[in-house]
Amino acid sequence: MKHATITETTFIGDANLRLTAKPPGRPIHKMLVSFSAAYFAGALVTDLVYWQIPDVLWERFSIWLIAAGLIMAGLAAVAYVIDLAGGRQIDTPAWPRVVGYALAVLLSLMNAFVHSRDGYTAVVPTGLMLSGLVIVALLLTAWVAMALANRTRVGG
Amino acid sequence: MMHALRIARSKKLPRLAALLVAVVSLGLAGCDENGGDPKGQIGANPVLPELQQYLIPPIRIAKVVGWGNDAPTVAQGLQVHALATGFEHPRSLYVLPNGDVLVVESNGPKAPISRPKDIITGWVQWFAGAKAKDANRITLLRDTNGDGKPELRTVFLDHLNSPFGVALVGHDLYVANTDAIVRYPYQDGQTSITAEGTKLTDLPGGPIDHHWTKALLASPDGSKLYVGVGSNSNIGENGIGAEYERAAVWEVDRASGAHRIFASGIRNPTGLQWEPETGKLWAIANERDEIGPDLVPDYLTSVRDGGFYGWPYSYYGQHLDPRIVPQRPDLVATAIPPDYALSSHVAPLGVAMYTGTDLPANYRGGAFVGEHGSWDRTPLNGYKVVFVPFSGGRPSGPAQDVVTGFLDANNHARGRPVGLAVDRSGGLLIADDVGNTVWRVSSNNARSASNN
């Protein structure tokens, strides 16, 4: 109950503030990055299933999930530029996140090509390994970025 | 690769990114690998390199430019002229006993999009001129005075469903649509059929229908029809269930419509012929893609009753394809290597055993093969009509180029040969589905020359 009240107050305050100075809003790209990460994670799951049950249906799930993840990543890149230009809050330090995410997206792009092969070798072993690497890259990026953000906060 | 590394470093990118750039460049560099000389893959024992898998499979298609006023080039002792032009994607030919030529104008049904790749494939096919409207009709050409210029051109049969094979037995004309064999009543000299067809049997058709052409050949006694049914995928990527009774030559009983699998494991048997000396069934076949510019050679082979020719599990006998799981060692053990390789990705789509007398004597008894041409290989391969000499019912020498010039000096496609047929006076007819022409090759002697 208390929480709801706060939200309402904040909302009204925010609306008033907009008239005077533009506040740093929530960055758009973060949401899109989360979407792409979820798609890539889904592809790893469907790859694992295909590895165990080689039914083409699972390979098709994988390639569409990877393709959707790549589209989201493209949109995230555009949104990132808009966020930078619009002076929205970007988590500092930004470089580890950008590099780690870019690496994951490039691996996914390679993975999309591997998954476009015909037959079993579209997934096993290279596609499955790439799907796994993408998730490792994303997790490491999140972990490093979090650690660095904490250190920056403590240090600053 | 070192070059890519240097570039990456010079831009002071983090080391991981540099490594990634290097890896991606390596993957792309793989696409530049050219195929070897096709000569090593023609004949009974083709050289088969190690198979390779691509990050980005090569796509190399010839841009379509058309013929203008040009014509194909023919071997010595032959001449060529356009029998008729202005067709819509002519795919196959059939000559009726009275000399009338049937031109099957056809294209495949719309392919479904199951993967993002299928969208790309659609663009590639459009660029290669393979996305022509499906005319779904058979046109009749009649050249009464034998001057090589038909006086009559009529729509023989219309509203078909991606037709390809045609066979006449007595007064029954069979058309192999992509999904069924249909019988029509035919009277000698008829120039148009309006009667409703009667379905003899269903054939494996949609919704995927990856290889849609159905070649058709009647047995000499007319009791059976043989049908070439292509696979529903390159290498099983649509699931093994989609391949039920496909990649096979069917034997259909003409009286009942019942069928059995005469031979299997032939990825895409696009043409069937009787070898004139032994009376055995021979077929041309299109082999699998995406494992290298020199794999797997397309072939011409005798088709044994009950024989298994490898697809999808293996090629050329026991060479396993790792893209198909689970494997079938029991079937692979029985896989028959084809008799005669035509080299890789030439796409044979028409075959005619020559029993006529008009062409020079060295062509008698051998097989003409129409090679539509490669789309995934550098340098381009095929795009010509070749002749495979036969002796004692077996191929007896290297394939010779008979009709070339389908590619111009810039490797642009002026046309692409497809179905072949021998007309009543012994001329070789060639359907050209990009030049939209039917070419006629005849002997370059005084008699024929005076007719032009």
Image (cartoon, coloured by chain):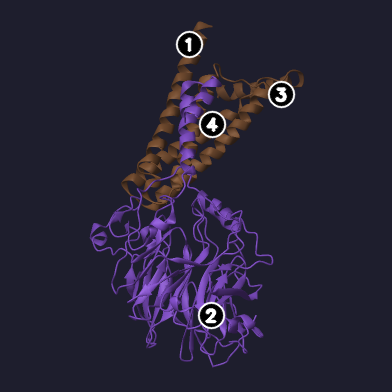
Chain colours: A brown, B purple
For this view, does B41 lie left or right of residue B81? left
Q: Nearer the viewer, mark 2 or mark 1?
A: 2
Q: Position of residue B423 (x, y in %)?
A: 53, 82
The alpha-carbon separation of the residues under discs 2 and 3 comes to 86 Å
Question: For mark 2, does the 10 Å Cα neighbourhood hold few (<14), some (14 to 19), or many (20 or more) residues?
Answer: many
Q: Chain of mark 2?
A: B
Q: Chain of mark 4?
A: A
Kind of residue at badge 1: Arg
Residue identified by numbered label 1: A151
Residue identified by numbered label 4: A33
Residue at 46% over, 91% down:
B170
Q: Please tell me how many numbered marks the rendered image carries.
A: 4
For this view, does A20 lie left or right of residue B202? right
Q: Are marks 2 and 3 on the same chain?
A: no
Check disc 2 and report its element: helix, strand or loop: loop
Residue at 36% over, 76% down:
B281
The alpha-carbon separation of the residues under discs 2 and 1 comes to 85 Å
Check disc 3 and report its element: helix, strand or loop: helix
- Residue A143, compared with residue B435, is above or below; it is above
- The label shown at residue A15 is 3
Q: Nearer the viewer, residue B416 or A108?
A: B416
Q: Position of residue A124 (x, y in %)?
A: 35, 43
Q: Nearer the viewer, residue B6 or A70?
A: B6
Residue identified by numbered label 2: B427
